[in-house]
Every structure is written in structure tokens, then in C-alpha cells.
Image: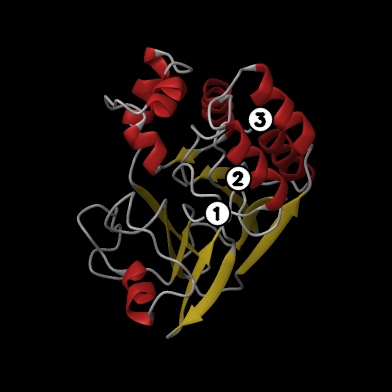
């Protein structure tokens, strides 16, 4: 059996990322896939990019990874932009939209927010039509098997880990490594099955929660004089969204 760790939404939080990677190391994963939003919100976007480049087999693009490379007059985003080099921006610009593969006979598709856009946010309580639309093929998604729709979709973006079975399909969200908005612990998912196999077999989806040093994450943000510090601290400590900046 093969094991794939799926992480998402690091948002420049290095203590959280390192704790998750240590947990992944103990579980002997075959590969790590990242579903985007490496940067922004937290203070260490550049280090997050460097680490993800080294440890992840595939990284797809998130909404922060998309708009942080574009001109803006928003001072907070400008601050985060100044943490990145030209090489970091190039890496983010070249990230793919989605990744998909067969595992134990299921077609599994991974992307950041939806099959249509980095910015199309789908919540677990949205109407069933919206949630079923997550399985659609679009010209953005990879579509390795032509018109066949995925059996399993896993995404990030909303920072809220969940799994639902809908009409025989499975929709799951990894939650967030660096900015969880359900409980104040880093979150990721393990997919376990026969990677690349068209033959039906056992497949498991396991949700992992990893405590990390939140005080250290806050200390790093204070040391860098990061803007919007108080909303960031409240989100890390309470796992509740305060609305001061985008997910």
C-alpha cells in the first residue's frame, strides 16, 4: 500500500509546517502533495516556499499564490510581497492548477478551491449542487481520463477539515497547516491505497491533527512587525476567522 500526505494552506507559518513535516516523517509517507497557499497571512512566506519546493512531489497553486505575484495597492499584501524574491514569484507563477491520479481504482483529483477557480469558495454546508460541482471536469483541471469525473476530490482553501460522501463520491478538505479555522491545531490528510492502480482495492482517507508551538509562531510574527498582527494572533489561538484578511 502507498501513502500520500496531502497538506495545504501553510500561509508562512513555519512552526506549524515543521511540526506537520515531523509527523509525516514518522509515518513514512511515499510522497507529499501540497494544495497551495504557501504564502501570506503569516510572516515567513519565503521560508515556506523554500521548504515546500524541497519536500513536495507536486504543489498546486492557491489564491494567495496567485494574487501575491500581481501588482496591488493593498499595503498588507505589499508587505507579504516584499518577503519574496523574484525566484519565489516565478515558482508560484508556474504552479499547476490541479493534480490527479488513480489509486485503488478511484480517480482522485486535488486542487486548491474548486475545479473552476482559485477563488470559488465551497463550504461543507453549501447547497448540494455546489458541492457536487466540485467533481466537474473543466478546462482548468487535468482530466487525465478524458470525460470520466473523479471519484474523490480533495481540496484546501477554506481551512476547515471535513469529509462527505455524496452520490457515491467523496469530497474532503485537508484543513490548513498554518491557519486552521476549526480547531487550533495543524491539519493534513493521508491517502492510502495502491497508487496508479486501475484495479479496485482498499482506499483510506485519514485526517491528522498536529499540535504545534503557537506562541513561537506569534513571536516570529511580532519580530518581523507583520501587519494585521492582532487578527492573526486571534485566528491562531482561537481558530476563528476575524475577517481582516483573505483565507
Label 1 sits on a secondary structure element that is loop
**Which label number is shown at residue 159?**
1
> Outermost residue toward the bottom?
167
**Image height of 172 relative to 190, above or below:** below
Which residue appears at 41% of the width and 28% of the height? 77
Label 3 sits on a secondary structure element that is helix
Label 2 sits on a secondary structure element that is loop
Q: Is residue 205 left or right of residue 62?
A: right
- Confirm whether residue 61 shows in the render: no
Q: CA distance from mark 1 to mark 3?
A: 17 Å
For this rendering, which residue is in front, 36 or 199?
36
For this rendering, which residue is in front, 136 or 198?
136
**N-term-proximal mark, 1 vs 3:** 3
Q: Are marks 1 and 3 in contact (CB under 8 Å)?
A: no
**N-term-proximal mark, 2 vs 3:** 3
* Coloring basis for residues: secondary structure
Q: Which residue is mark 3?
A: 14
Which residue appears at 73% of the width and 25% of the height? 219
**Image height of 127 relative to 3, above or below:** below
Q: Which residue is mark 2?
A: 179
Residue 151: quarter of image: bottom left
Which residue appears at 63% of the width and 52% of the height? 188
Quarter placement of the N terminus: bottom right
In percent of width and height, residue 90 lies at: 34, 22
In percent of width and height, residue 233 lies at: 66, 39
In percent of width and height, residue 112 lies at: 42, 51
Amino acid at each position: 500500500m502507498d501513502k500520500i500526505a496531502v497538506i495545504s494552506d501553510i500561509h508562512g507559518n513555519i512552526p506549524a509546517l515543521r511540526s506537520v513535516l515531523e509527523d509525516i516523517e514518522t509515518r513514512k509517507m511515499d510522497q507529499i502533495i501540497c494544495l497551495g497557499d504557501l504564502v501570506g497571512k503569516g510572516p515567513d512566506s519565503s521560508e515556506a516556499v523554500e521548504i515546500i519546493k524541497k519536500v513536495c512531489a507536486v504543489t498546486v497553486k492557491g489564491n494567495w499564490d496567485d494574487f501575491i505575484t500581481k501588482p496591488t495597492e493593498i499595503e498588507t499584501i505589499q508587505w507579504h510581497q516584499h518577503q519574496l524574491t523574484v525566484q519565489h514569484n516565478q515558482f508560484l507563477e508556474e504552479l499547476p492548477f490541479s493534480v490527479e491520479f488513480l489509486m485503488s481504482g478511484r480517480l482522485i483529483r486535488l486542487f486548491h478551491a474548486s475545479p473552476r477557480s482559485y477563488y470559488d469558495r465551497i463550504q461543507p454546508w453549501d447547497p448540494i449542487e455546489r458541492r457536487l460541482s466540485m467533481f466537474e471536469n473543466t478546462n482548468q483541471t487535468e482530466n487525465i481520463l478524458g470525460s470520466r469525473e473523479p471519484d474523490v476530490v480533495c481540496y484546501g482553501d477554506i481551512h476547515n477539515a471535513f469529509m462527505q460522501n455524496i452520490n457515491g463520491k467523496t469530497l474532503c478538505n485537508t484543513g490548513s497547516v498554518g491557519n486552521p479555522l476549526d480547531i487550533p491545531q495543524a491539519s493534513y490528510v493521508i491517502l492510502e491505497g495502491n497508487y496508479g492502480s486501475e484495479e479496485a482495492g482498499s482506499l483510506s482517507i485519514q485526517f491528522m491533527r498536529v499540535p504545534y508551538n503557537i506562541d513561537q509562531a506569534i513571536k516570529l510574527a511580532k519580530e518581523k512587525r507583520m501587519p494585521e498582527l492582532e487578527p492573526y494572533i486571534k485566528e491562531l489561538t482561537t481558530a476563528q476567522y476575524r475577517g481582516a484578511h483573505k483565507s
